[in-house]
Image (cartoon, rainbow, N blue to C red):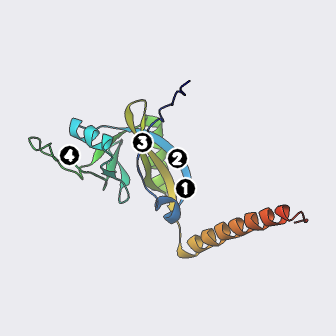
Amino acid sequence: MSRKTQAKAPDPTIARNRRARHDYAIEETFEAGLALTGWEVKSLREGRAQINEGYISIRKGEGWLLGSHINPLPNVSHLPTDPARPRKLLLHEKEIAHLQGAVDRRGYTLIPLSLYWKQGRAKLQLALARGKHKHDRRQTVKTRDWERDRERLLRRSTRQGGKP
């Protein structure tokens, strides 16, 4: 008898902004579609995207992803390609109004968190965030270390049969 092997679904994540959660306090997250050209979609399928330096700006009632790079494939030479061009975000008007108000009135920043596939379409997870100060980052690291040590102590005490 042969076992049927299930094919693992490929990871839908294309690119992730790992520094975002370290440098910013995330308040809210949103999902937006991207208006892309054909060569950009092909490059995303190959995983040739970078959103670490990206940010989001709202101009004239439209959201734009700026500062991100989608490197073209080597065989796309007959088309004019700009890897760092601004890309339009597909958001609802209410979402845009909410984001614009938060950025203008309350001093928030819009940052990209991750770029991924959802039902065959490229989506961007963006966050309404506030920048952390140096002491906030230190406190986050201290809290994380304490949680790790606490879990380690609890595991050790339960293995030895003692009370925590």
Q: Residue at 65% of width from left, 72% of height from top?
A: 142
From the viewer's perspective, is the residue at label 3 or at label 4 nearer? 4
From the viewer's perspective, is the residue at label 1 or at label 4 nearer? 4
Mark 2, residue position: 29
Q: Residue at 46% of width from left, 54% of height from top?
A: 103
Along the viewing direction, whichever of 45 and 94 lies nearer the viewer: 45
Q: Residue at 37% of width from left, 33% of height from top?
A: 121
Quarter of the rendering containing residue 135: bottom right
Using the numbered discs, state the Cα–Cα distance from disc 1 to disc 4 in whole angstroms.
Answer: 33 Å
User: In the rendered image of this protein, does residue 100 appear above or below residue 109?
Assistant: above
User: Which mark, residue 26?
Assistant: 1
Image quadrant containing the N terminus: top right
Residue type at mark 2: give it.
Thr
Residue type at mark 3: give it.
Tyr
- Whether label 3 touches label 1, CB < 8 Å: no
From the viewer's perspective, is the residue at label 4 or at label 2 nearer? 4
User: Which mark, residue 116?
Assistant: 3
Residue type at mark 1: give it.
Ile
